[in-house]
Image (cartoon, rainbow, N blue to C red):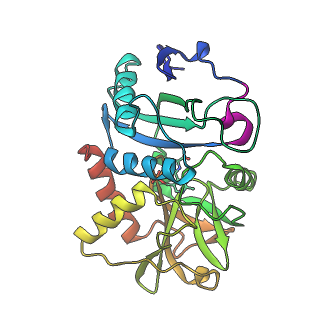
Amino acid sequence: MDPKDIVYVNGTFVPRADARVSVEDRGFVFGDGVYEVLRVVNGRLFATRFHNDRLERSLDGVRITLKGGDSPARFVEIGKQLLRENDLTRGEATLYIQVTRGATTRAHQFPPPDIAPTVYISVARFSPYTEFAQTGASAISHPDLRWGRCDLKTLNLLPNVLAAQTAKERGAFEAMLIRDGVVTEGTRTNFFGVVKGSLRTHPRDSHILPGITRLVLRDLARDLSIELDETPISVAEIPKLTELFLTGTTTDVMPVVRLDDKPVGTGKPGELTRRLQRVLAESLASGSD
Ligand code: PDD
């Protein structure tokens, strides 16, 4: 635990141990809420505008209306204050923002309009997976059991939790989710692969979360004149993968060198993966906003 452990809940800054939300909170009872995770390097938030836009889309998508002048931009300002109060303006950290539909007597339908959303914001020290980034990690394939709006970053993460745990129990870092015969994404990452020399990833649609790292990497690849084909990788193509990596706010570009206990390509991080890993690291270090 960080020496000062201050979080923000519904308008107040409090020590984490004293932070309280109601047992009737709809986030607790229904998983009825949305969230964001941002990366912070030396006090600078990465890709803030993209995260704010996504939070806006998630809120709209589940029809949660913020109140009292709250907005994603305001949450980011609160996040910056938390970083200062928790002495996290140097080194690596993450910012977590969660908004639920508020607390009220349990009923599936929305609460009355006077019930305000619950807002919880916290920051934490973060250690990047530097070793896996070098050696590469392993993954398993797993059925994608999620709903039809995976593009919204909601708190309902049970299929992700179960798949992540299965991966862990099989000694793997991540589960690669398969729906309708194609790779969608990971439990907390997006997947990219190289098939016959071409860099591929699932297109942006309701079956994946439009990852911010995925988006940043797409722009970085374009700058390097690396073509990205947004055609999903089919299950039949998995044995033909010469490179595989995942992307995410807390994983950066992570090579995947073993899939379902078989080597991917040479069994070492691929050349394209390495290049993209480098450019993302440079972008993170330069504090691109
Ligand atoms: N997860 N896909 C899913 C299902 C995710 O939950 C995430 C992020 C990503 C990658 O998105 P981004 O590049 O914006 O982090 C893809 C966060 C980190 C989490 O749940 O902790």
Residue at 50% from the left image edge and 47% from the top image edge? 59
Front-most of residues 226 and 15:
15
Instruction: Look at the picture and state if 96 lies above or below 60.
Output: above
Q: Quadrant of the N terminus?
A: top right
Front-most of residues 1 and 130:
1
Is residue 27 shown in magenta?
yes
Instruction: Look at the picture and state if 223 lies above or below 113.
Output: below
Residue at 42% from the left image edge and 41% from the top image edge? 38
The part of the image, by quadrant, that contains residue 40 is top left
Q: Position of residue 90 (x, y in %)?
A: 32, 27
Q: Position of residue 169 (x, y in %)?
A: 75, 51
Front-most of residues 213 and 277:
213
The part of the image, by quadrant, that contains residue 105 is top right
Is residue 100 shown in magenta?
no
Number of marks in picture: 0
Front-most of residues 200 and 108:
108
Instruction: Look at the picture and state if 190 lies above or below 193.
Output: above
Q: Position of residue 232 (x, y in %)?
A: 53, 78
Q: Position of residue 100 (x, y in %)?
A: 59, 37
Tell me which segment is drawn in magenta: 23-31
